[in-house]
């Protein structure tokens, strides 16, 4: 890697350079989206943390998902905003390495976490009597830790390997951020072995969890259709719809980005696909889960009532203290 640093000390991100007149508009749009992502996901984390009734596997997984997506967008969007507002497109070699590492780490972790969430829904609907035993807090912690460790392993293996190749002075990345495919396009060495590993790794990390999710929901759909109660079917569909929407939003663009042949899409279409899972999923997930979940809406109302009650109690105590103070002054 040191050899590369002596040849290439920084990279230039060319994303949006073909649309100079739209830069300010894009800056405003992405800034608003980023703020909504931060607020929406932070609210979900606080609601689940503060409300004890939501300390069940489905919402504990959702809390981790919200943290991941906040960090994922935070890895990408701030640099994009700097580029759009200042046209300073340079990112240091170390900064590019760090950005790729966190994209792989957070993205890989989310793949496995979404799979864990599908297994949770499978057990809840297909094996409800054994749900408390099968989905204990200890097992949920293990699934979460396994997702994080798997994501870290992917990033630790792939990132140093990419940047161990010679770049031969080529440093213009035709993309919005330091993602593996566009960075690999700059390499002037033989990447055949890495591309085989990357393709197999992508199938293992992206497609296998995705297939497991599909199998889980195939079984869930079979069980739901066998239910005699219309209310029960509607409730089961409702609990799964939010997660299925998240899976579609995340896996669709990710599969197209990492499993497509090199010449299949233009640079602009690749940028749009990357934006879909970098911005669209973190933006919509808080809306999807909060609007579709009566438990989340009920928990938010309870928290607001408690805060309002505490505020009113504080006002009453202040008035009482003032009255006592006046009485003591009058007595003197």
Image (cartoon, rainbow, N blue to C red):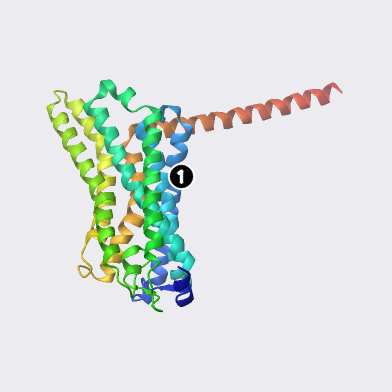
* As drawn, 134 above or below 250: above
Residue at 63 percent of width and 27 percent of height: 316
In the rendered structure, the answer to whether residue 111 lies left or right of residue 97 reads: left
| Residue 297 x %, y % | 38, 34
Front-lying residue, 330 or 253: 253
| Residue 323 x %, y % | 73, 25
In the rendered structure, the answer to whether residue 88 lies left or right of residue 331 reads: left
Using the rendered image of the protein, determine whether residue 297 is visible from the camera's viewpoint.
no
Front-lying residue, 199 or 13: 199
Residue 278 picture quarter? bottom left
Residue at the far bottom: name it: 169
* As drawn, 84 above or below 140: below
Query: Mark 1 — residue?
Result: 42
Residue at the far right: name it: 332
| Residue 52 x %, y % | 45, 28
Q: Quadrant of the N terminus?
A: bottom left
| Residue 96 x %, y % | 44, 65
* As drawn, 128 above or below 76: above
Asked which secondary structure carries label 1, the reply is helix
Q: Quadrant of the C terminus?
A: top right
In the rendered structure, the answer to whether residue 94 lies left or right of residue 315 reads: left
């Amino acid at each position: 890697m040191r050899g590369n640093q002596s040849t290439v000390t920084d990279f230039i991100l060319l994303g949006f350079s073909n649309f100079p007149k739209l830069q300010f508009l894009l800056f405003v749009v992405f800034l608003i989206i980023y703020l909504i992502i931060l607020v929406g996901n932070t609210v979900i984390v606080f609601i689940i943390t503060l409300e004890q009734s939501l300390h069940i596997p489905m919402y504990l997984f959702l809390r981790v998902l919200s943290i991941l997506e906040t960090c994922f967008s935070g890895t990408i969007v701030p640099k994009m905003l700097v580029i759009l507002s200042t046209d300073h497109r340079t990112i240091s070699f170390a900064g590019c390495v760090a950005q790729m590492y966190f994209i792989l780490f957070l993205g890989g972790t989310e793949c496995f976490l979404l799979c864990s969430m599908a297994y949770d829904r499978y057990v809840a609907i297909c094996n409800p009597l054994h749900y408390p035993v099968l989905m204990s807090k200890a097992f949920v912690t293990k699934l979460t830790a396994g997702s994080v460790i798997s994501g870290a392993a992917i990033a630790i293996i792939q990132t140093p390997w990419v940047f161990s190749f010679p770049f031969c002075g080529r440093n213009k990345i035709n993309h919005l951020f330091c993602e593996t495919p566009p960075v690999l396009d700059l390499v002037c060495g033989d990447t055949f072995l890495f591309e085989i590993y990357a393709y197999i790794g992508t199938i293992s990390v992206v497609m296998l969890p995705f297939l497991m999710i599909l199998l889980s929901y195939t079984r869930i759909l079979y069980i739901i259709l066998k239910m005699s109660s219309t209310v029960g079917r509607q409730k089961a569909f409702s609990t799964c719809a939010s997660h299925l929407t998240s899976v579609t939003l995340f896996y669709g663009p990710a599969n197209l980005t990492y499993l497509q042949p090199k010449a299949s899409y233009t640079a602009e279409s690749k940028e749009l696909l990357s934006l879909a899972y970098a911005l669209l999923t973190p933006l919509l997930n808080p809306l999807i889960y909060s609007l579709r979940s009566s438990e989340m809406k009920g928990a938010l109302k309870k928290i607001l009532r408690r805060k309002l009650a505490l505020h009113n109690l504080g006002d009453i105590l202040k008035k009482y203290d003032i009255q006592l103070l006046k009485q003591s002054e009058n007595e003197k």
